Image (spheres, helix red, strand yellow):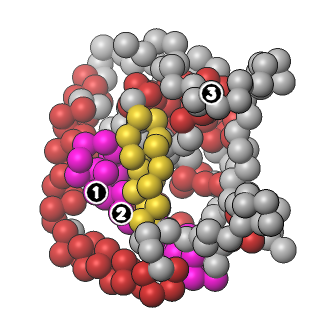
Amino acid sequence: MLTSPTVHRPSDREMRPAPISPGRRSARSHRSPRVKRAFDLVLLLATAPAWGMALAVLAILVWAKLGTPVLFRQKRPGKHGRVFELLKFRTMTERRDASGKLLPDADRLTAFGSWLRSTSLDELPELINVLRGEMSLVGPRPLLVQYLGRYTPEQARRHEVLPGITGWAQVNGRNAIAWEDKFKLDVWYVANRTCWLDLKILVLTALRVVRREGIAAPGEATMPEFMGQRSLLAPPPAEGARPATVAPRGFP
């Protein structure tokens, strides 16, 4: 039975976006997309031999343990809600019930897949997404496309920046905190992001991975689906309809 790990509960100050004053020009420059992109590329190139070898070894292990495909591919919304193909190592089987429907995550997650998730090694192929410019090393995690229509205008601000492999929410509870708290942390990051903060988050992420904290929500194999605050009032989608891909308010 899964238990909830001890989680750092961020203060209101950590969650509250800080106003930008004229005297904070240096912080503004650190928020430049070009500076952030350069920061990502320098770190990736400096560590390429290590993560390149790790990718190759893990790909062989996934193939031997779970078969093909080795990579899990899924459409996710990125900056400004633009959809891209997220890459991760496969962690689940394709087991289905008698009617052909996929079994729940807990029934399809293997021991090897659970280990990949607990060490966050399943996220390693997302470095390819970073190289492509679709993601950043640090930023709000890319969630499901259908969530776009479920955000409040404030929550939708998480899409003002590139999604990240790790983020402020991941080092403050990851999947062990509620969706609402996670989105508040994402928005705080959007308003306060700097290269120094990114470096701090990367260090904290390494510590969380070693301790294997916040991997799953209490009582769940993975994070439960986000249904949105207005989901009870929304009509069900028509059969065969595509997931909503309209960018949240304020996007070009």
Q: Is residue 197 left or right of residue 230?
A: left
Q: Amino acid at mark 1?
A: Ile
**For marks 1 and 3 on the same chain, the one whose residue lies earlier in the sequence:** 1
Taking the magenta stretch, the answer to whether it contains residue 179 is no
Check disc 3: other Cα within 10 Å, few if <14, some if 14-19, many if 20+: few
Q: Residue at x 18, y 75 (%)?
A: 49
> Would you call the spot at circle 2 few (<14 residues within 10 Å), some (14-19), or many (20 or more)?
many
Vertical arrangement, residue 214 with respect to residue 64, above or below? above
Residue at the image position 18 percent from the left and 34 percent from the top: 34
Q: Is residue 39 left or right of residue 18?
A: left
Provide the secondary structure element on which disc 1 rests.
Answer: helix
Residue interval drawn in magenta: 111-139
Q: Is 196 placed above or below 240 here?
A: below
Closest to the camera, between mark 1 and mark 3, is 3
| Tag in front: 3 or 2 | 3
Which residue sits at x=78%, y=66%? 97
Tag of residue 177: none
Quarter of the rendering containing residue 146: top right
Going by the numbered disc 2, the residue's amino acid type is Pro
The residue that mark 3 highlights is: 241
The residue carrying mark 1 is: 128
| Mark seen at residue 125 | 2
Q: Determine the CA span between mark 1 and mark 3.
A: 31 Å
For label 3, the SS is loop
How far apart are the alpha carbons under marks 1 and 2?
6 Å
Residues at badges 1 and 3 in contact (C-beta under 8 Å)? Answer: no
Q: Is there CB contact under 8 Å for labels 1 and 2? A: yes
Provide residue 226's location: percent of width, then percent of height.
Answer: 70, 39
| Coordinates of residue 142 in the picture (x, y in percent) | 48, 43
Q: Main secondary structure of the magenta part?
A: helix
Q: Work out whether residue 239 or residue 39 is closer to the camera in this orientation and state it.
A: 239
Disc 3 or 2, which lies upstream in sequence? Answer: 2
